[in-house]
């Protein structure tokens, strides 16, 4: 998603990454003292490994097999945010810190099957504690977008994080919590027909799209790199006042309610004929409609709702007759010109219908 971005626009002196070779015991100690942020939202991601796969990680350590490097991002508080290695850290926490994991499905050390951490010998515990691991810490002065690029490049082992999971990791606190709050709204779930998966934060990607285009617009600040733009949009939430966040949330709810009332379970889907089989939800149509709906006032929303049949048939007509509009929601939808075209097009359609 998005284009590759060069590090050249950033001041190289601000890109700071420390390399350390440490005992695994020191990381365990950090986990015990909550010095590594395993946000509750990450626990869902941490659960993606089965108990057998977690057990095989512990087996690898007992066998002395090397592990991939860990990557962390330093927060202002001094805590570390996980960039790469969450599955392994979640395993260490469940097996050693919480002692909830029971070893199972081992490939070589079958005698350990059924053991918890407390069942291990002193020698095995020392082997785990003294196990050497490499870690890299992205220092806090490193620009956020550089962190995001580093995140993408190092996230190559285990379960590959989605771009939204990366954005979540780099925008903890207010942004992450606010996006979660919107993703859990019944208005959003209903408008998307309960079809957006939450397991890999796909639902939050939809929310992030709305927020970025709503807060930053689609003209001057959108340069054509969707990943970076969505990260900027999420980060912008940190600077909103409470009344601004309340207004954003209310307009989002009104937008989702309007979409459901106009389209029912067909909202945010491409339709070229009213009798065609229903298509999957289109992110390009979603971000364009949701933001345009949110920017209307209550009178305009009510007028559009009254003329919902005309609005639906007009969209079908324009998707068939305007090839540029159809392409803008079909291929290379993150292209800057296509984004602008579809936003302007939907805005014009809405305005023309409201004025009739």
Image: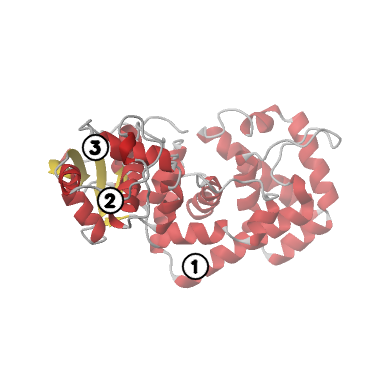
Q: Residue at x 25, y 56 (%)?
A: 31
* Label 1 with label 3: CB-CB less than 8 Å: no
- Pointer 1 residue: 244
Side of 317 where 339 appears, left or right: left
Binning the other alpha carbons within 10 Å of mark 3 as few (below 14), some (14 to 19) or many (20 upward) gives some
Q: Residue at x 70, y 49 (%)?
A: 193
Of pointers 1 and 2, the one earlier in the residue sequence: 2
* Label 2 with label 3: CB-CB less than 8 Å: no
Q: Nearer the viewer, mark 2 or mark 3?
A: 2
Side of 215 where 31 appears, left or right: left
Structural distance between the alpha carbons of marks 2 and 3: 16 Å
Q: Residue furthest front?
A: 111
* Label 1 with label 2: CB-CB less than 8 Å: no
- Pointer 3 residue: 61
Residue 180 lies, in percent from the top left, at 50, 58
Q: Nearer the viewer, mark 1 or mark 3?
A: 3
Q: Secondary structure at mark 1?
A: helix
Q: Nearer the viewer, mark 1 or mark 2?
A: 2
The one of 100 and 316 positioned closer to us in this rendering: 100
């Amino acid at each position: 998603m998005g284009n590759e971005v060069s590090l050249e626009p950033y001041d190289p002196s601000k890109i700071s990454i420390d390399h350390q070779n440490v005992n695994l015991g020191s990381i365990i100690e950090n986990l015990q003292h909550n010095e590594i942020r395993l946000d509750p939202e990450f626990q869902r991601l941490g659960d993606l490994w089965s108990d057998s796969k977690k057990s095989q990680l512990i087996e690898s350590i007992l066998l002395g097999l090397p592990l991939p490097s860990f990557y962390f991002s330093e927060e202002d508080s001094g805590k570390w945010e996980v960039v790469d290695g969450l599955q392994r850290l979640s395993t260490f926490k469940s097996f050693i810190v919480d002692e909830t994991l029971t070893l199972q499905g081992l490939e070589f050390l079958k005698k350990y099957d059924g053991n918890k951490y407390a069942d291990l010998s002193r020698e095995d515990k020392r082997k785990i504690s003294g196990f050497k691991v490499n870690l890299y810490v992205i220092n806090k002065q490193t620009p956020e977008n550089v962190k995001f690029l580093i995140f993408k490049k190092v996230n190559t082992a285990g379960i590959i994080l989605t771009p939204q999971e990366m954005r979540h990791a780099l925008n903890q606190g207010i942004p992450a919590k606010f996006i979660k709050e919107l993703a859990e709204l019944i208005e959003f779930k209903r408008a998307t027909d309960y079809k957006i998966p939450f397991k890999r934060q796909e639902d939050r990607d939809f929310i992030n799209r709305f927020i970025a285009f709503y807060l930053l617009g689609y003209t001057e600040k959108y340069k054509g790199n969707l990943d970076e733009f969505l990260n900027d949009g999420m980060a912008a939430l940190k600077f909103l006042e409470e009344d601004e966040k309340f207004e954003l949330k209310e307009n989002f709810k009104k937008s989702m309610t309007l979409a459901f009332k106009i389209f029912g379970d067909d909202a945010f889907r491409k339709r070229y004929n009213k009798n065609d089989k229903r298509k999957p939800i289109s992110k390009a149509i979603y971000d364009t409609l949701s933001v345009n709906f949110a920017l209307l006032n209550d009178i305009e929303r009510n007028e559009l709702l009254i003329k919902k049949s005309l609005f639906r048939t007009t969209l079908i007509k324009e998707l068939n007759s305007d090839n540029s509009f159809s392409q803008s929601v079909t291929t290379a939808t993150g292209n800057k010109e296509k984004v602008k075209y579809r936003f302007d097009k939907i805005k014009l359609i809405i305005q023309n219908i409201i004025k009739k």
